[in-house]
Image (spheres, rainbow, N blue to C red):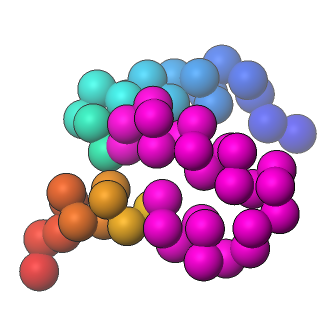
Amino acid sequence: MTDPSIVHATGRKISVVRIYEASEVNALVEDYLAKKGNNALERWIKPAVDRHDVR
């Protein structure tokens, strides 16, 4: 079982460092609900990866 307060606290921490944008999350959810598959998932995760790529 997950403690909802931990989930929300973690979400706030991630939001502060701007790992993702709300528009990216919303678009990802839309694509997920439309069953667009893994390519859609990768499409919306890539901007966050690009912003925080430390290679």
Q: Nearer the viewer, residue 12 or 5?
A: 12
Q: Nearer the viewer, residue 5 or 27?
A: 27
x%, y% of residue 16? Answer: 28, 26
x%, y% of residue 18? Answer: 27, 36
- Please say whether residue 21 is visible from this viewpoint: yes
The quadrant the N terminus occupies is top right
Quadrant for residue 49, please give it: bottom left
Q: At 68% across and 45% down in the image, what residue appears?
A: 29
- Above or below 20: residue 3: above
Left or right: 47 in relation to 44: left
Quadrant for residue 25, please give it: top right
Q: At 48% across and 68% down in the image, what residue appears?
A: 43
Q: Main secondary structure of the magenta part?
A: helix
Q: Nearer the viewer, residue 7 or 53?
A: 53
Q: How many marks?
A: 0
- Above or below 41: residue 19: above
Tell me where the magenta segment starts and ends, as one range.
20-44
x%, y% of residue 46? Answer: 37, 67
Looking at this view, name the residue that lies furthest to the right: 1
- Please say whether residue 14 is visible from this viewpoint: no
Quadrant for residue 37, please give it: bottom right
Q: Is residue 7 on the magenta stretch?
A: no
